Image: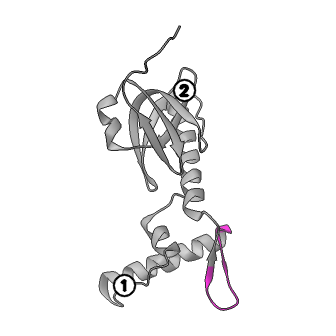
Amino acid sequence: DGATWLDRRLVSAEASDLVPSGFGQQVREAMDRRREHHIDRGDAARQPNGGIAYRRNLLATLREREVARVGGELAASKGLPFRAVSDGETVAGKFTGTVQLSSGKFAIVEQSQEFTLVPWRPVIDRRLGREIMGVVQGGSVSWQMGRARGLGL
């Protein structure tokens, strides 16, 4: 249910560079099966001219579905509720680990009463087990490192 390499190839405007035999043929067949999967799920439709029209923002939709599914599975094992984050939202909490999904690698950030999954970047690896903060923007996170300065309670 996540955004795979095949999905990125399917929605790409680039011409196919796959050879019609061997591994190239296997990839073509996998792409055909994935295309049919999207049509069956309503994420794509056949056009009268024979082409395929994919749902707008298909990759983001697939990523969100996968994150929601895995978040629900992790919630059961962690005993904490999962909360999805939206674009423009600030995420702050303890970086407790990572999870590899077909949509990419995600960081597990735990707040006091819940946890969330956000796109991982190598810059946060050294912060494992510590507090982190970042802003979600367009399927990525702008991480803010270091201590904030100013007055506080």
Q: Is residue 139 left or right of residue 104?
A: right
Q: Is residue 42 above or below residue 62?
A: below
In the rendered structure, which amino acid carries the disc numbered 2?
Answer: Gly
Q: Is residue 54 magenta?
A: no
Colouring scheme, one of rainbow, by chain, secondary structure, one colour:
one colour
Q: Residue furthest front?
A: 150
Specify the segment rendered in magenta. 41-52
Left or right, 9 with reference to 35: left
Q: Residue at x 50, y 32 (%)?
A: 77
Which percent across, then down, holds residue 143? 42, 37
Look at the numbered discs 2 and 1 and tell me whether their residues touch, using CB distance below 8 Å.
no
User: Relative to residue 90, is residue 12 depicted above or below?
Assistant: below
**Front-most of 44 and 120?**
120
Q: Which mark is residue 79?
A: 2
Residue 90 rendering spot, x and y as whole percentages: 55, 34
Residue where numbered disc 1 is placed: 17
Q: Residue 85: x, y in percent?
A: 59, 40
The quadrant holding residue 44 is bottom right
- Distance, label 2 to label 1, CA atoms, is 47 Å
Determine whether 71 is above or below 38 in the image: above
Helix, strand or loop at disc 2?
loop
Task: Give me the residue at 53% from left, 7% from top.
Answer: 153
Residue at position x 34%, y 29% in the image: 128
Query: Foreground mark, 2 or 1?
Result: 1
Earlier residue among tags 2 and 1:
1
